Image (cartoon, rainbow, N blue to C red):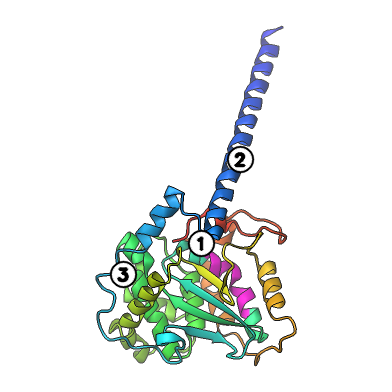
Amino acid sequence: MGVNEKNRAGKQSARQRLQIERERERAREKRRRLVLVSAAVAGVLGLAAVVGVIAANTGGKGDTAGKGPVTAPSGATGEDQLVVPVGAPDAPATLTVWEDFRCPACAMFENTFRDTIHELEAAGQLRTEYRLATLIDGNMGGGGSLNAANAAACAQDAGKFSAYHDVLFANQPEEADDAFAKDAKLFELAAKVPGLDTPAFRSCVTGGTHDGWVNASNEAFRAGDFRGTPTVLLNGEPIFPAKGNEQISPANLRKWVAQANKGKKPGTATPSAGASASAPGAASQSASPSAGEADGGSDTGSGPGFGADPAY
């Protein structure tokens, strides 16, 4: 065999070894993702990484919870008025969403499912009940989770929670960047929601009007023994990252809502306040984890690869 032939054979062998190693790595990654999905769905806490995330998220903010008056925002509902409702009050299906405005997985969920949720709300098929938590403040330090949640409650006072909620998640900073702790950043984003950036809103934000309410909501989350954020329930049943053997996806969410509503009359249709206002922030979405960073999949049991990421 000549020198050139030996070189070609050597290169081919190296390529083959590289290909084999890549295939092995993909197989290992697939197994890892499957294990994490199973842990999230079944509540199996044997994985040290999952346990560590849960332990970090359920501690840290206890020293501030309960301090200050608990002033619920206008229109808050539920036990202790800790729910911010969006959509027709008489919609046959209820989506409960626990979120933290600094949580990357929450931004991934919102930026993927926002349009679908608004579509179902506008059709009177779905009522969304938002409940806020401050886990990242306890886990990473800082105050952006609390400050942004208070600002969102201030937006609720102005009747603009849905729109501002969407803008916050569409413009979420990097997890380690506690930009939401700065009132100026929250005012900057409020300007993207027509009519929100008013003296009353600014006073509510700077004064921390709803800080006590946010802390009470976070305590309710901790008392609920949830695994992390986002926690998403459809009529009380967990659907994130999966419902049964089907991973959540926009198509599957529509299907699950249709199944839950079979034979039921839609609620009073309402226009989505969030759809138009969230568009200006979409250009800044690259600052937060997007659905594009997750593995894609079909709607028949796969979707965005949420199961690959720990809940925050």
Q: Is the magenta stretch mostly helix, strand or loop?
A: helix
Binning the other alpha carbons within 10 Å of mark 1 as few (below 14), some (14 to 19) or many (20 upward) gives some
How many residues crowd mark 3 within 10 Å: few (<14), some (14–19), many (20+)? some
Picture coordinates of residue 99 (x, y %)? 46, 71
Question: Mark 1 or mark 3: which comes first in sequence?
Answer: 3
The label nearer to you, 1 versus 3, is 3
Element type where label 2 sits in the image: helix
Q: Is residue 183 left or right of residue 282?
A: left
Report x, y in % for residue 166: 51, 76
Residue 176 in sight: no
Residue shown at 44% from the left, 53% from the top = 50
Image: magenta residue range: 108-118
Residue under the point 71% across and 58% down: 298
What SS does tag 1 mark?
A: helix
Q: Position of residue 72 (x, y in %)?
A: 37, 88
Q: How crowded is mark 2: few (under 14 residues within 10 Å), some or many (20 or more)?
A: few
Q: Name the residue beneath numbered marker 2.
A: 26
Q: Is 299 in front, or is 79? A: 79
Residue at which label 3 appears: 143
Residue drawn 47% across the image and 60% down it: 311
The amino acid type of the residue labelled 1 equals Ser
Question: Quick check: 284 left or right of 87?
Answer: left
Report the residue marked by disc 1.
286
